[in-house]
Structures are given as C-alpha cells and as structure tokens.
Image (tube, helix red, strand yellow):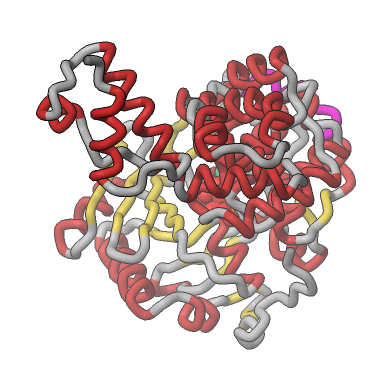
Amino acid sequence: MVMGITLYDGKGSADIITGVMNLGRQIEQYLPQQVLELVRDISGQAAKQKQRVYLVGGAVRDLLLGYPNFDLDLVVEGDAVRLAEQVAETGQAKLLAHHRFGTAKLRYENFTLDLATARKETYARPGALPAVTPGTLKDDLIRRDFSINAMAISLAANDYGELVDPYQGESDLERRLIRILHPESFSDDATRILRAVRYEQRLCFELEAQTDELLKRDIPMLDTISGDRIRHELELIFKEKQPEFIINRLAELKVLPRISLFLKGDGWIVEKFDKARRLKKPTQLPSLYFCLLIYSFGETGIEQFLARLNIPAKLSRAMRDTLRLKTRLPLLDKSPLKPSEIYYLLREYEPLAIQANAIASDSSIVHRHFRLYLTKLRYLRTSLDGEELKRLGISAGPEMGKILQILHKAKLDGEVKTKADEKKLALSLKSA
Ligand code: CTP
C-alpha cells in the first residue's frame, strides 16, 4: 500500500504558465529516453497531418504521483490506426490494429504503446458496450471512469507538456479522492464499482462523498455486467500488490454478495492471500487467489460462481478440485502414511488445488504430505516400461497393467530402487 503521496515527488515542481500546468520537464525525467524519442516521433508524424497526440489515462495520473507506469496510452485527434501504421513502417514495432474500434497497439521489445482515435461514447443501455463515434479529446476524457484517469498531456510541439484537466483530476489527486465524472457513471458501466475500490485501495485514496453514495446505490447494476467482464476486473484486482484489502473493502461495501452470495472478505483471506504470495510466482498467483476466494463455498455456491463469471475450463477444474480435496484433508492429516497412500489420495487433483489446500490448512502433517507429493511423488516413474516387460515374457494386457501398477507402488514406497530390483519383482509376479 502506498502512503504519503506528494505530487511531483522527486521531479521538481511543475511549471505553471498563465494558469495552465506544464509537465514538459516531468515527462523528460519520467519516460525512458527510448520511449521519449518515440513519443516525440509519433507526435511529429501526426503534426504533419494536422493531427494532435496526447498522453492520457493511467500514465498521466502516475506521472503526477511520481509512480512509474510505462503502459502508455496515446489519444489521437485524427486517425490513430493510420498513424500507428506509419510509425510501424518506419520503426521496429509490431502492429496490432483494430480498424473497427480505431485503436492500435505498437509492440516494441520492452514496452507497448496503445494508440486510440479520440472518441465519444454513448450507452444504449446500462452494462452494454458503448456505441463509439470519433470525437474530440474532451469527449474522450468525459467518457472515462474517474477524474484522476481523465487527464491528458499534450505531446504537440506548440504546447508540449500542457496538462489538459477539464474535470479537476489534478485537484482530486491532491485531495486523494476517487470521483466519477457524472451521476450515471456506475450505472452505465458497473465494472467501475470494482475499479473504484481497486484504485481507492491501491493509492490509499478515499471515495468522494457523492461517488460513495452513487456506488452504493448502483451496486445492483452489477447484474447488467457479463461474466467475462466481472472476471476480468477480478483478474485485475488479483494483479494488485495486496488484493486482499480490495476484497475486504468490497465486502464491507456489500459489493461482493452481488457477485456471489457466498463470497466473503475477512481475516482469513488476508492471512491466506499473504501466504500465497510468499509461495507462488506472480504469474500463477491470480489463479491461486481464485481457489482461495471460494474456499468456504459449498457445491451450489461454486457452480453458481463458475457460471456467473464464465470461468475457463482449466481454472474451473482447479477450483472444483480445491473444494473436493478440502473434504479429504482429514485422510491426509494422519501420520504415518505410506508415500503410495499419499500418491493415490492426491493424484486426481490439479496441482493448483493442492497448493490452495496447502495454504488453507494449518496442519504440519498435511503440509509435509503435500510437499512430498508436489516435489517428488508425482514425478516418480518406473524404470521398466511395457516394451521391456514384454522382453521379460510378460504379455501386454491386464497382466502387464497390474504388474506396472505394482512396480510403481513399490517404487513410490522405496521398496525397489534400481532397474534390477524392478526386473526381479516383475519376474516374481509373472504368472507361470
Ligand atoms: N477506462 C474507463 N472505464 C473503464 C476502463 C478504463 O474509463 N471501465 C479508462 C480510464 O481512463 C483508464 C484508461 O481507460 O485510465 C485505461 O484503462 P486501464 O488500462 O484499465 O487503466 P490504467 O489507468 O491505464 O491502468 P491501471 O488501472 O493498471 O493503473
């Protein structure tokens, strides 16, 4: 969690000329040289066609806060796709263009740039994806979620660095407030309810009073949002440094029950998410958080949740396995268990479900058994294969299957160590 934000921290103060804040110097210090040159080049190419380019959204917010963010979004008053095509021709970028949406992504070796044609949005009905038409920068900013994300910095030569802040985002950054831009913002797009809490917790900000009121009023509008979009927002939450505080805050605001009546935020989540982070690589963490999030669910709860969020098959399997394995934990909380017994108890479960249960359980015996399975038992194979058994005179079919199983069990339990041991055991089992 970030504490004690000072605007322009370490970047020197911004220049204010005739009441307009100029962040030209800050951009020069903030962006890596390579990115800076590229952004200037893009802006120069746009100017030749009388088009203007702006840095917008999260990067402007983070630049003002002095936080690194090289996920750059550029808005073009003009044709963003054509501009991106020209830039891709002259540079070493890979281009991914969406003509229909007027957006393009330029992928460089260490970073990406998103270009979008400035647009106006209208919502046909709450929760629907908006209808989009070309617009001005101001149109493009008013369609955004919060004032702190609705600022732009001009990259044009004549007013390079000028902050465009029609909705007082900079003042909200100073006051540390998350504020929507119009009263129907949450009902137009209820994913903003989840986004508001994510930014509030990430930045240690507060919800502005009316925003707080409208957020609570519009919680039922989450029903208008597709499962894929809700899941995407949860995935974004799970990429944050400490998602447990966002989950708990969503519980406090009574947002969670609107997604699933069984979802909870509590001290257990705080403890277990923290433990997950100490065990798992960041790329695998979101899936593990999903498994821990539903740990207190019963059968009905999990099926409703998987369906509501349209969870993909592999993750669904891991989440169902998490709950199935939870019911079998007492069988694993005994000592001593033979390695083969541990193996047969665990082999049908996704490794992620085993990891989730390892984090959830407080038993050192269970931990020891899980560790043995995950690090060793699941990889153990017999040295003899079917072909070699045939050469020993064992015919393919049920007999061979049985012998291979016995060999594997003996290997798990350390009763055979070498290939010669396995041969000896196989021959002793061969029917006369
Ligand atoms: N945006 C929005 N409403 C949404 C999603 C996005 O208005 N439901 C706008 C915001 O202005 C946001 C920008 O689109 O700043 C880019 O979205 P995203 O990449 O999700 O946010 P960033 O602020 O760039 O990144 P992050 O949340 O990781 O800081």
Q: Main secondary structure of the magenta part?
A: helix
- Single out the residue that lies furthest toward the left: 391
Q: Which residue shows up at 60% across the image and 84% down it?
A: 11
Q: Is residue 340 magenta?
A: no
Looking at the image, which is closer to me, 75 or 370?
370
Q: How many marks?
A: 0
Quarter of the image that includes the N terminus: bottom right
Q: What range is drawn magenta here?
A: 216-225
Looking at the image, which is closer to me, 86 or 34?
34
Q: Return the x and y of residue 170 as percentages of the image width and height.
A: 70, 64
- Single out the residue that lies furthest toward the front: 432
Q: Return the x and y of residue 344 as percentages of the image width and height.
A: 51, 28
Give left or right: position of 85 versus 151.
left
Image height of 177 relative to 284, above or below: below
Q: Return the x and y of residue 147 as percentages of the image width and height.
A: 69, 52
Q: Which residue shows up at 31% across the image and 58% down it?
A: 50
Q: Is residue 217 magenta?
A: yes
Image height of 37 relative to 295, above or below: below
Residue 98 shows in this picture:
yes
Looking at the image, which is closer to me, 334 or 15?
334
Image height of 116 relative to 305, above or below: below
Residue 130 shows in this picture:
no
Q: Which residue shows up at 71% across the image and 37% down it?
A: 334
Give left or right: position of 194 versus 407.
right
Quarter of the image that includes the C terminus: top left
Image height of 238 relative to 124, above or below: below
Q: Return the x and y of residue 403 as percentages of the image width and height.
A: 31, 23
Q: Which residue shows up at 64% across the image and 51% down it?
A: 276
